[in-house]
Amino acid sequence: MTIFQQRQQWLQDEMRKRGWSGFLVTHNVDIYYYCGSMQTGYLFIPTEGEAIYLVRRSLVRAEEEAAVEALGSWKTLGERLRARCAGTDAAAVAPLRIATELDVLPVQLYVRLQTALPGAVWEDGSLLVREQRMIKSPDEVTAIRAAARVVDDALEAVIPHIREGMAEVELMALIEHQLRLRGHQGLMRMRAYNSELITGMVASGASAAVPTYFDGPAGGTGLHPSSPQSSGRALIQRGEPILVDIGCTIDGYLIDQTRTLVIGDLDPELQRAYDVAEEVLRATEARLQPGTIAEHLYLLALDQVQEAGLSAHFMGYGADQVKFLGHGIGLEIDELPVLAKGFKYPLAPGMVIAIEPKFTFPGRGVVGIEDTYLITEGGYEKLTVSHGGIRRL
């Protein structure tokens, strides 16, 4: 049995518990997770029996990657899905209960599906899928490890070329060039609506602390209001923090890492804030073990920064502070679990989590660190391998 069949079987077991007839997977990332292909179409997993991957384009490419059928006419879609449910216990109970990922499903497509399957009850299966994806297989972890090595190699190749007066966007371009040469896919997927990220956030001094729409502690001016995030045209100056919050995607899987660089020395207040970020990370690491509740790690961090007198600057500033310490990572950068208030998930072996304590000082910059960890039976393994501490250039 392949890893994709195992994932489908797990989902079928969970659907039976809920009395669902089937699951229509529409989101590209989820389609890949369950069948190993990412062509335009839909994957339908009935509660009993084999899944059907209905592809519009490219059928030729999809046939090389998975067992597929042509999507064909939209008018016949409902009939084909009903036929797949015919042999299930749930089919004996009217109406059919079909789950899908309502967190990302466009309303227009939802209306078309309701028309294609009149009388069916649509269930929100998005949380179930996201919870399944929290636990990574050995192959998934291998890809994330590979991404971590690429980030480290790329950063080491670029650091000797950083100079005073260099534009932020030039530094970002050098990093992206080195990442791409080493296999970075050039895209870091996010699930959140209207959120997007290419390679990360590289900014220096005051511009790093400029807030933006992106749900993170550092914004960046970006190059234009149409892309108001990350690197802009500001010139890197001596003594200001250079925040290098970058990721890399290898075989679909992401790593997330932040390092703080400086030409010369940091202002003592910023240096102290960075030291506190390191202390928060070390204290969090000490509790990275199966059974620890995700929320507790965030609350512990809040206590630490309050004791240090830095609460006003933790993970953003003012109304733009974000309310988390870390996040799951895998095929998408914003996976479960989230280290935030209200997330009661106990840590479990196989979870991969990025932890990013940072401090934002408007007009001055952002300092902090981020590493990515695998939760193991005995504790954790740090997957990011770049040199820690502030890098003085």
Image: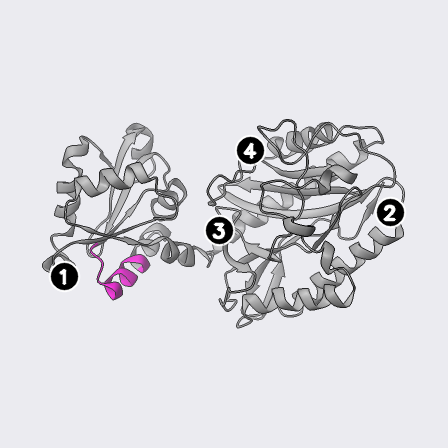
Between tags 1 and 3, which lies in front? 1
Distance (Cα) linking label 2 and label 3:
38 Å
Q: What colouring method underlies this structural image?
A: one colour
Q: Which residue is mark 4?
A: 186
Q: Residue at x 65, y 27 (%)?
A: 223
Q: Which residue is mark 2?
A: 266
Q: Are marks 1 and 2 in contact (CB under 8 Å)?
A: no
Image coordinates of residue 391 in percent, x first then y, are 81, 46
Q: Residue furthest front?
A: 319
Distance (Cα) linking label 1 and label 2:
66 Å
Q: Is residue 109 magenta?
A: no
- Identify the main secondary structure in magenta: helix
Q: Is residue 12 magenta?
A: yes
Residue placed most toward the observer, 284 or 186: 284
Quadrant location, the C terminus = top right
Left or right placement of residue 335 versus residue 385 in this view: left
What is the span of residues highlighted in magenta in the rendered image? 10-21
Distance (Cα) linking label 4 and label 1:
44 Å
Residue placed most toward the observer, 45 or 326: 326
Distance (Cα) linking label 1 and label 3:
33 Å
Amino acid tagged 1: Asp
Q: Earlier in the sequence, mark 1 or mark 3?
A: 1
Q: Which residue is mark 1?
A: 89
**Label 2 crowd bin: few (<14), some (14–19), many (20+), radius 10 Å:** some
**Label 4 crowd bin: few (<14), some (14–19), many (20+), radius 10 Å:** some
Instruction: Determine the secondary structure under disc 2.
Output: loop
Image coordinates of residue 362 in percent, x first then y, are 76, 45
Q: Which residue is mark 3?
A: 140
For residue 32, what is the image quadrant? top left
